[in-house]
Amino acid sequence: MENFVFYNPVKILFGKGQIANIAAEIPADAKILITYGGGSIKTNGVYDQVKSALAGRNVVEFGGIEPNPHLETLLKAVEIVRNEGIDFLLAVGGGSVLDGTKFIAAAVPFVGDPWDILAKNAPVKAAVPFGTVLTLPATGSEMNTNSVITKWETQEKLPFSSPLVFPRFSVLDPETTFSLPVRQISNGIVDAYVHVMEQYLTYPVNAPLQDRMAESILKTLIEEGPKTLANPQDYDARANVMWSATLALNGLIGAGVPQDWATHMIGHELTALHGLDHAQTLAIVLPSTLTIKRDRKWQKLLQYAQRVWGIVDGSEEARVTEAIAKTRNFFESVGVQTRLSDYGVGLDTIPVIIERFEKRGSVALGEYKDINSQIVEQILTLSA
Ligand code: NZQ
Ligand code: ZN
């Protein structure tokens, strides 16, 4: 096992009715900014629950944070926080609202152009404290330090990470997700699944506990994902998917093991350039990444085949091929297509993506840092 430091201070309030308990988590004298997206929280009752939990508190609101949140929108919130003396943020929504709020939190005290936090890895030295009410299980943003922001002007989508943007608390009430459109549930299942794969499907380092935790999350998503799609009001299925998505990217399964993340980095470019949903890009790229890098991922692919899909017969070659095929079929079975052509994206996007990577520095993705421009091209070509 590799050395690691594991730290995760996020308090989770899980289950029905937990929004009612948020007031106790926020300092009594705080001036609060509630941040939200395009309005789903106003039609599904979540907004009303939050407002009644915060009755009598000093509250300001900022709505309109888009999916794949835009820098340009978030900077407007930064101004409000600075001008109105806001000292606590409450993000209410999906991963985009949470990520956007993390950026606001870090940008408020930042001296200089806040985009440098993403574009130049400028260190985050302070952040406004915040909590979250999650309404879409997918990203793990509710219990991690990551945020992915899009600069609309240049169509760039970049991540940043800082321990200062751990939420103080996150409410996970599965009932808030009952109103999700099918497409977003499908996306959430695939995003969580790929988060696990990015931390699991690399090479063995004799970390059987991390492996088995990862496999448990994958198997839970395979079992509970279809249930929650078939019956969106099945509380237990939704709860199981929600907690799986949180644990998929809260740092636990990735501690002490190599990590890949090439699929995510390539996927972000597809979203930035073509507007595909985050999970759609992952469903396209992951099967090709596994196929192109199969030789170096061989041992873990065999383990995955056996433990997650129960594939034990046939040659090693046949088992690896079947495991990758099962992965693709699973994504499609939960409603996310896996080919660039399914989304009308042509191969002419490949040189554009490679040029963007190269402009940012040398291309060295994956657990071995051996995915260069040529291999990105192979992966995307195979994804046609
Ligand atoms: O904006 P509203 O009206 O709220 O509607 C949203 C949005 O249109 C809707 N929605 C959310 N909860 C709902 C709901 N509709 C009905 N009922 C509910 N309960 O769903 C739509 C999509 O929301 P969004 O927040 O964009 O989705 P998701 O949670 O999948 O977040 C995707 C973003 O997270 C980033 C992605 O890159 C993308 O920008 N990621 C963040 C990560 C992290 N912080 O660790 C890791 C991920 O790999 C990912 O990159
Ligand atoms: Zn993701």
Image (tube, rainbow, N blue to C red):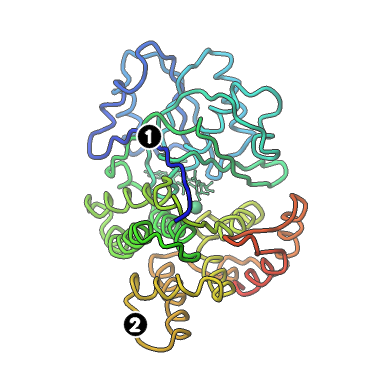
Outermost residue on the bottom side: it is 314
Foreground residue among 120 and 103: 120
Horizontal and vertical percent position of residue 330: 40, 70
Q: Earlier in the sequence, mark 2 or mark 1?
A: 1
Tell me if the residue at label 2 has its CB under 8 Å from ligand 2.
no
- The residue carrying mark 2 is 312
Q: Residue at x 45, y 20 (%)?
A: 88
- Which numbered marker is on residue 10? 1
**In which image quadrant can residue 327 be found?**
bottom left
Q: Secondary structure at mark 2?
A: loop
Foreground residue among 182 and 264: 264
| Viewport quadrant of the C terminus | bottom right
**In which image quadrant can residue 329 be found?**
bottom left
Horizontal and vertical percent position of residue 337: 49, 68
- Which numbered marker is on residue 368? none
Horizontal and vertical percent position of residue 294: 54, 75
| Viewport quadrant of the N terminus | bottom left
Q: Is residue 322 above or below residue 25?
A: below
Q: Residue at x 67, y 66 (%)?
A: 376
Q: Secondary structure at mark 1?
A: loop
Does residue 293 appear left or right of residue 138 in this picture?
right
Q: Residue at x 39, y 72 (%)?
A: 303
Horizontal and vertical percent position of residue 344: 61, 67
Q: Is residue 123 above or below residue 230?
A: above
Outermost residue on the top side: it is 29
> The disc labelled 2 sits on which kind of residue?
Val
How many residues crowd around disc 2 within 10 Å: few (fewer than 14), some, or many (20 or more)? some
Asked if the residue under mark 1 is in contact with the one under mark 2, i.e. CB atoms within 8 Å, the reply is no
Q: CA distance from mark 2 to mark 1?
A: 40 Å
Does residue 111 appear left or right of residue 287 in this picture?
right
